[in-house]
Amino acid sequence: MTRPTKRLPLLPAERALKVISGRWKAVILYHLFDGPRRLNALKAMMPGITQKVLIQQLREMEEHGLVSREIFAEIPARVEYSATPLGLSLEPILLALCQWGQHHADELDETHRLADCIIRPRQSRDAHSSPAM
């Protein structure tokens, strides 16, 4: 992949954090893990984000290869955003971050302040059998 990107840190962990940092990037990716979404659908899922910030975060993730944008030749034009294979590869990492965030809240006795974090490994969502108990 040879698309131009802003200069990224040389340390791999720092590079990873730079690419996914941003108030909304993990949340946007979370919603794209289930499939393509239109801008208005993403906005409706995140009422606290402004459209300007949503577009900015999507553009940054597109620049870093995490999200793709498809424009359909319709009137009016329809645009859908999808997680790329590179973006989808972050799913287990975001799951681990959710689990660690839960652990952190448990340790500080703040679980009552948490929202649900429902990231499941892709295999369990794509499986055509009933989920394991």
Image (cartoon, helix red, strand yellow):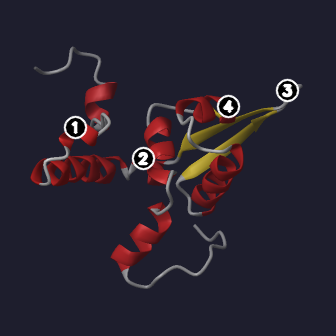
Identify the amino acid type marked 2.
Leu
- Relative to 66, say whether 28 is above or below: above
Say which label, 1 or 2, has the lower sequence index: 2
The label nearer to you, 3 versus 4, is 4
Q: Is residue 91 visible?
A: yes
- Between 34 and 110, the one lying in front of the other is 110
Mark pair 3, 2: CA separation: 28 Å
Residue 65 falls in image quadrant: bottom right
Q: Quadrant of the N terminus?
A: bottom right
The crowd level at tag 4 (other Cα within 10 Å; few <14, some 14-19, many 20+) is few
* Residue for badge 4: 40
Say which label, 3 or 2, has the lower sequence index: 3
The label nearer to you, 1 versus 3, is 1
The label nearer to you, 1 versus 2, is 1
Mark pair 4, 2: CA separation: 21 Å
* Residue for badge 3: 74
* Residue for badge 1: 112
Identify the amino acid type marked 1.
His
